[in-house]
Image (cartoon, helix red, strand yellow):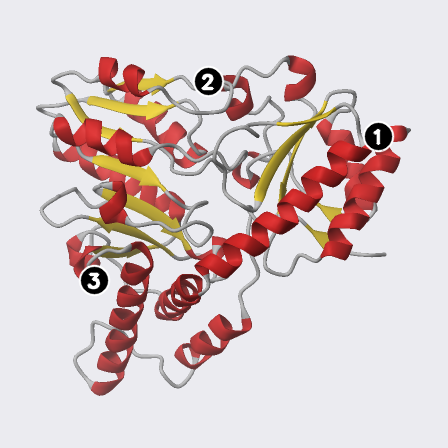
Amino acid sequence: MKKVFLDYNSTTPVSEEVLGTMLPFFTEKFGNPSSTHSFGQEALHAVNKARLQVATLIGAKVDEIIFTGSGTESNNLAITGLARLGKAEKNHIITSSVEHSSVFNQCKQLEEEGFDVTYLPVDSHGLISINDLKKSINDKTFLVSIILANNETGTIQNLKEIAEVATENFIPTHTDAVQAVGKIPVSVEELGVDMLSLSGHKIYGPKGVGALFMTRGLNLLPLLLGGGQERKKRSGTENVPGIVGLGKACELASNNIDINFEFFRSKRDRLEQGILSAIPFAKINGESTERTPNTTNISFSKMESETLLVKLDFSGIAVSSGSACGAASKSASRTLTAMGLPSNELYSSIRFSVGKDTTDEEIDYTVKIMSKICSK
């Protein structure tokens, strides 16, 4: 049976170049970066090189990168770390209704601890309103956290304008850029954000490693206490092989960002055009706004997404009905609900996400199988 993977937003394979860079740090280069002897200093040099590679990809300074265990941890460190630092004076957070669960659920938890959270609504394209943002700001607001690229639809928010509004009101801005970094050009300086989260396994790096960009002059309380690694913001012995892999993945992404963008977009467009031509009741969600080039979310109003997922899997095609982190939930997509989709579309939506290894043959096979399933 043909095997087709079209769920690259959930994860990506570790590239051969990344793996080759990582392997020595599991064996002969196994030192602890905090050790002062040559083994430790060799590891420390590798960590610092990776820090430069990550910083280069997003246009940051080297000392503004904090290594973490995942994109989720980066989001938690940014939001909860800042929240608990200034709880006595300010307790209001502004976020959106279409955030990844690692931001949304974290804000729900902070509400239980006494924080006030505003969840900005979105329009039918998945975009927040700048006017809504302006109206939501008050003298207790200490953070605006808005996702850069939605993990389900690929919708890209106007972070530059969002950050400008926040900065005018002396409020820091954080963005979850896990699904944006490596797919579109991302510059923290151009965006004007104060914190940005990214993850290794979304850009052909290893799982279990992420990074948080935090601008100079900003402070937050660490989630983990111990030896004071990572500028005393994330204690614990660094995952050197993972960090080295993340650094190499960022270097490759930086070198190939334009090529990858065009490649992803060509495959996604071929998939969309094929499905729309073959299936009259298919509809692309968020089509008329700027999206990441590899992602499409399509509703098949006469089908149920769970049925489609199973039938596609039986044909060797791997896709998803939303975020992999929320796959265990049987409830409707929070993102698509916020966009105002009717129930027949909410429960019939599939997310397709292409990658560097996606071929035209795989796209055409997927369209053929989708057409067969829907025709029955």
Q: Quadrant of the C terminus?
A: top right
Q: Give the number of the disc on residue 62.
A: 3
Q: CA distance from mark 1 to mark 3?
A: 51 Å
Q: Residue furthest right?
A: 376
Image coordinates for residue 336, horizontal then vertical, percent: 55, 23
Q: Quadrant of residue 346?
A: top right
Give, as a three-letter code, the residue at label 1: Cys
Give, as a three-letter code, the residue at label 3: Val
Q: CA distance from mark 1 to mark 2?
A: 29 Å
Which residue is nearer to you in this view: 77 or 293? 293
- The answer to which of marks 1 and 2 sits earlier in the sequence is 2
Image coordinates for residue 165, horizontal then vertical, percent: 20, 27
Q: Quadrant of residue 97?
A: top left
Of circles 1 and 2, the one toward us is 2
Q: Residue at x 25, y 29 (%)?
A: 144
Give, as a three-letter code, the residue at label 2: Asp
Mark 3 lies on a secondary structure that is helix
Q: Quadrant of residue 44?
A: bottom left
- The answer to which of marks 2 and 3 sits earlier in the sequence is 3
Q: Quadrant of the N terminus?
A: bottom right
- Residue under numbered circle 1: 374
Q: Residue at x 9, y 46 (%)?
A: 217
- Residue under numbered circle 2: 123
- The answer to which of marks 1 and 3 sits earlier in the sequence is 3
Q: CA distance from mark 2 to mark 3?
A: 37 Å
Q: Residue at x 17, y 42 (%)?
A: 221
Q: Is residue 268 above or below residue 288?
A: below
Q: Residue at x 71, y 38 (%)?
A: 273
